[in-house]
Amino acid sequence: MAKVILITGGARSGKSRLAEKLALDYGEPLLYVATGSPCDGEMTERIRRHRERRGDAWQTIEEPLALADVLLGHDGYFSATLVDCVTLWVTNILFHHGENPGEALAEVRRLADLFPSLQSPLILVTNEVGMGIVPDNPLARKFRDLAGEANEILAAAADEAYVVFSGLPLKLKG
């Protein structure tokens, strides 16, 4: 069984940089699974900056929905796999399943159930979205609750968990 690490925190907190550093410690080759899609100019630029920062040590796969399948299909071929980010993936599956959080949580549980069988270390980046005000609309509240539940499921199944504030990691588990 390979180690699974979950890294959470707010936007621009340093989560991805920590995840990349931890992955690099395993050596090359490395797999980066991006769950975001270049849906507009700003997101396209963000993806470009992330790829540039990572460099040539990484193979990138962009997969907005079938995360578990990608991990299964590539497990054992890389020194480590980094998924960035779980929150975007949860958003994608929520909309894919007609805004049904139960269906989305089933996908999250399927992912967590894979952890014991993995051969390559897995590092998951996610956002902590529940530390702000209660959203003013039903869909935003549904998403906030879903993201929180997904993070709970994944953190419980992970070997290590970190939260990052202002670029400073705090180890929560492991």
Image (cartoon, rainbow, N blue to C red):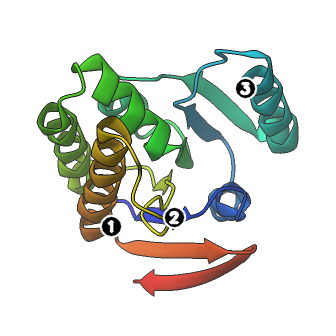
Measured Cα–Cα span from mark 1 to mark 2: 9 Å
Please report contact status of discs 1 and 2: CB closer than 8 Å, yes or no: yes
Q: Check the image and report above or below for 22 versus 27.
A: below
Of the image marks 3 and 2, the number of the one nearer the N terminus: 2
* Secondary structure under the numbered disc 1 in the rendered image: helix
Q: Earlier in the sequence, mark 1 or mark 3?
A: 3
Q: Is residue 15 left or right of residue 9?
A: right
The disc label shown at residue 155, or none: 1
40 left or right, relative to 102:
right
The amino acid type found where label 3 is placed reads Met
Q: Nearer the viewer, residue 57 or 124?
A: 124
Q: Position of residue 57 (x, y in %)?
A: 77, 40
CA–CA distance between discs 1 and 3? 27 Å
Amino acid type shown at disc 1: Ala
The residue depicted at 68 percent of the width and 65 percent of the height is 18
Mark 2 neighbour density, 10 Å: few (under 14) some (14–19) many (20 or more): many
| Amino acid type at image mark 2 | Thr
Across and down, in percent, residue 113 comes to 17, 49
Q: Which residue is mark 2?
A: 8
Q: Are marks 1 and 3 in contact (CB under 8 Å)?
A: no
On the question of residue 69 being in view, the answer is: no
Residue 105: where, in percent of width, then height?
19, 42
Does any portion of residue 160 appear in the rendered image? yes
Query: Which of the two labelled residues, at mark 1 and mark 2, occupies the earlier sequence position?
Result: 2
Measuring from the top left, give residue 83's x and y in whole percent.
51, 43
Q: Which residue is mark 3?
A: 43
Q: Looking at the image, which is closer to me, 111 or 142?
A: 142
Classify the position of the C terminus by image quarter: bottom left
Nearest to the observer: residue 41 or residue 23: 41
66 relative to 52, above or below = above
3 and 2 marks in contact (CB < 8 Å): no
Task: Locate the N terminus and report the quarter of the image it occupies.
Answer: bottom left
